[in-house]
Image (cartoon, helix red, strand yellow):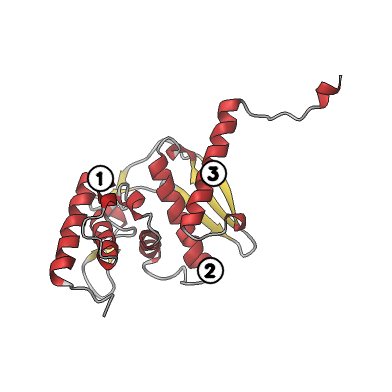
């Protein structure tokens, strides 16, 4: 009779394991991004079928968000699209990007109105050592491009493959990593841009960052 009152999990075993594994993954990414996971709440949503559109210049645009950052002053929420749960590497990149918002916007380091908000967020992920996950699946769409301030040069909303290649190479160059093993995990086109950028920095030392 007393067995009737034993606590039971409302989920079947496979669903229970999925939730626990994904929460553990989020905890790990929080650690890499130096974010206290107890200060962030995780929420999930599901986008519909991907919708690919073109702007009036024939360039691809999309409104689907893989993740969202929300902070109303009293709590911080990270929303993740469940469609990417079958791609753990992409999911890590999305988690890292949204947690970079926590480091920049949530901690008051930058204003949300700055022109390079999303670019700087991607670059923060590179700084914390998780840039490879975004470089392998960049969120940049040509139709989102605007212009670099004071120029007529197109500026992506999120970091492009070329920007990731150079940023990752810059990180390796500053750490004096001549042939980093982790570069082998970059997808071929990103890896090619990385080695091109690293060779350029090694040969010329042309960077204002360390001046």
Proximity of marks 3 and 2: CB atoms separated by less than 8 Å: no
Residue 116 versus residue 28 in the image, above or below = below
Q: Earlier in the sequence, mark 3 or mark 1?
A: 3
| Contact, mark 3 vs mark 1 (Cβ under 8 Å) | no
Which residue, given by chain and number where applicable, does mark 2 sit on?
107
Asked if the residues shown at circle 2 and circle 1 are in contact, with their CB atoms under 8 angstroms apart, the answer is: no
The residue that mark 3 highlights is: 24
Residue 97: x and y in percent read: 43, 55
Left or right: 45 as drawn, with respect to 92: right
Is the N terminus in the top left, top right, bottom left or bottom right quadrant?
A: top right
Q: Nearer the viewer, residue 86 or 48?
A: 86
Judging by the rendered image, the residue that carries numbered circle 1 is 187
Is residue 174 toward the left or the right of residue 25 in the image?
left
| Secondary structure at numbered mark 2 | loop
- Counting residues from the start of the chain, the first of labels 2 and 1 encountered is 2
Note whether residue 181 is visible.
yes
């Amino acid at each position: 009779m007393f067995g009737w009152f034993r606590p039971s999990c409302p989920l079947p075993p496979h669903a229970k394991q999925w939730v626990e594994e994904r929460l553990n993954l989020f905890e790990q990414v929080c650690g890499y991004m130096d974010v206290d996971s107890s200060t962030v709440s995780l929420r999930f949503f599901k986008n519909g079928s991907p919708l690919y559109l073109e702007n009036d210049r024939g360039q691809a645009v999309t409104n689907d968000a893989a993740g969202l950052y929300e902070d109303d002053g009293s709590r911080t929420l990270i929303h993740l699209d469940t469609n990417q749960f079958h791609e753990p590497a992409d999911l890590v990149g999305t988690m890292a990007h949204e947690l970079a918002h926590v480091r920049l916007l949530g901690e008051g380091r930058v204003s949300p109105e700055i022109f390079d908000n999303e670019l700087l967020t991607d670059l923060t992920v590179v700084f914390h050592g998780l840039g490879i996950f975004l470089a392998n699946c960049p969120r940049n769409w040509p139709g989102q491009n605007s212009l670099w301030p004071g120029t007529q040069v197109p500026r992506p909303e999120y970091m492009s493959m070329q920007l990731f290649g150079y940023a990752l190479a810059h990180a390796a160059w500053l750490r004096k990593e001549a042939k980093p093993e982790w570069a082998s995990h970059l997808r071929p086109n990103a890896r090619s841009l990385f080695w091109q950028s690293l060779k350029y920095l090694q040969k010329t030392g042309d960077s204002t960052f360390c001046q």
